[in-house]
Amino acid sequence: MEIKIAQVGTGFMGKTHSIAYRVLSTFVPAGVKVKLQVLADVTEELARDGARKFGYENWVVGWEKIFDHDIDAVDIVTPNDVHPAIAIEAARRGKHVICEKPLAINVAKTREMVEAVEKAGVVNMVCFNYRQIPAVVMAKKLIDEGAIGKLYHFRAQYLQDWCVDPESPFVWRFQASRAGSGSLGDIGSHAIDYARYLVGEFDEVVALTETFVKERPLPGARDVHPVDVDDAVNMLIRFKNGAIGCLEASRFCYGRKNYLTFEVNGSQGSLYFDWEHCNDLFFYSARDREDRQGYRDIKIGPMHPHAEALWPIPGINMAYVETAILQAKEFVTAIVEGRQAVPSFRDGLQVASIMEAVLQSAATGSWTKVPLVV
Ligand SMILES: NC(=O)c1ccc[n+]([C@@H]2O[C@H](COP(=O)([O-])OP(=O)(O)OC[C@H]3O[C@@H](n4cnc5c(N)ncnc54)[C@H](O)[C@@H]3O)[C@@H](O)[C@H]2O)c1
């Protein structure tokens, strides 16, 4: 069986997803072949050079033209405002869809995407790739087994530093009409996904956002452009199951490059994870004998969920590309098996609902209920 992929976008994620597809036949069920059929971008140079570098058979200028080719699935790796039109048209034509996060710039647009893929009955997946990491799946397994007991606290941070310099140029990520939000949707959405995945649905939030640099220079021009998204967001969370949480996302933290962490504390223990050391999961069990209590460092290897597909012993280690491989593996395997992929567009919609409540809370300064929309 052959799965023919059309990809839209040739930037950072375009490169990452393409690398994953190129090796995917090694990771999917025997006999399944993944073909990089066609690549689209906005200029001939981007599309042609991307196709040559990434290994696509064909390239087109303008995403609408991907449908002139024989394709099974569409991978969307464009800025956020472009996602809905592509996803909805792909679904209408019966193509399976994988789309980067956040799915759209608001809940209304995200809901249109969910309705389109569900009406068409196509496999759909949102790219919360950081939840594919074996250490994170292992944390979920331990929580589900009751290893840390009743959940009390969740805390997460996603911190970067690429925006601190006010001369860092204006790009789509600083524009609400293109990105939806700033640090919240760009990086905070991954931490919110962790919160839902590991702890459960949100009941309410109270949040604070700040935009430290209000305008930025346009690339190659003397003009500046206003920034209308959050540079940083801090929130408190009340979960439906009684646990409480705090979550912070900022692109203004010098020294933090891609610092994504969580800690979960329960009645019987704790779990701690740090993406920059993603081959380790730290587990504290209050059931250990008192004279040997302390965080133990679980070295991730083939005995852990999702990692069995990768390397033969712990310590070989995995990193960013493996998250893309595991994500693409889930998407393509779901197509082959005729089941829904996880996380789906519905997960993306609930994260959008949380983010909208966060922005509303930041605007009003009050606790805000999170509508359950899935
Ligand atoms: N999951 C992750 O770890 C992760 C990391 C970075 C970005 N992202 C997400 O991936 C998406 C893309 O981000 P990126 O960093 O690759 O951005 P990017 O700016 O590097 O690349 C975007 C690409 O889309 C192309 N593009 C723009 N408009 C288009 C259109 N109308 N038709 C076709 N192509 C178009 C651009 O020319 C460019 O090649 C965003 O949704 C972002 O939030 C996810």
Image (spheres, rainbow, N blue to C red):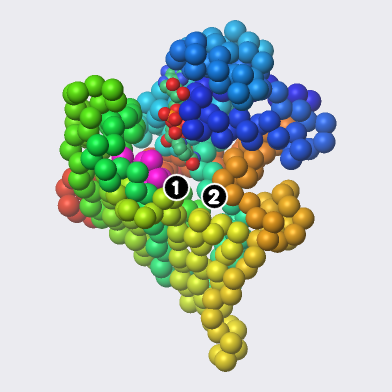
- Which circle marks residue 190 in the picture? 1
Which three-letter amino acid code belongs to the residue tagged 1?
A: His
Q: Are marks 1 and 2 in contact (CB under 8 Å)?
A: yes
Residue closer to the observer: 169 or 57: 169
The picture quadrant for ligand 1 comes to top left
Residue closer to the observer: 87 or 374: 87
The image quarter in which residue 296 lies = bottom right
Question: What is the residue that sits farthest to the right in this orientation?
Answer: 31
Image coords of residue 71 (percent x, y) = 65, 17
Residue located 42% across and 43% down the image = 350
Q: What predominant SS class does the magenta segment belong to? A: helix
The image quarter in which residue 206 lies = bottom left
Image coords of residue 89 (percent x, y) = 50, 17
Q: What's drawn in magenta, residue-wise?
A: 182-190
| Number of residues whose C-alpha sits closer than 10 Å to that of mark 1, classed few (under 14), some (14–19) or many (20 or more) | many
Look at the image and tell me in which quarter the N terminus lies: top right
Label tally? 2
Q: Sequence order check: which comes first, mark 1 or mark 2?
A: 2
**What residue would you read off at disc 2?**
131
Residue located 20% across and 45% down the image = 212
Residue located 64% across and 40% down the image = 325
Give the answer, above or below, for where 368 lies relative to 54: below
Residue located 73% across and 48% down the image = 309
SS at mark 2 in the image: helix
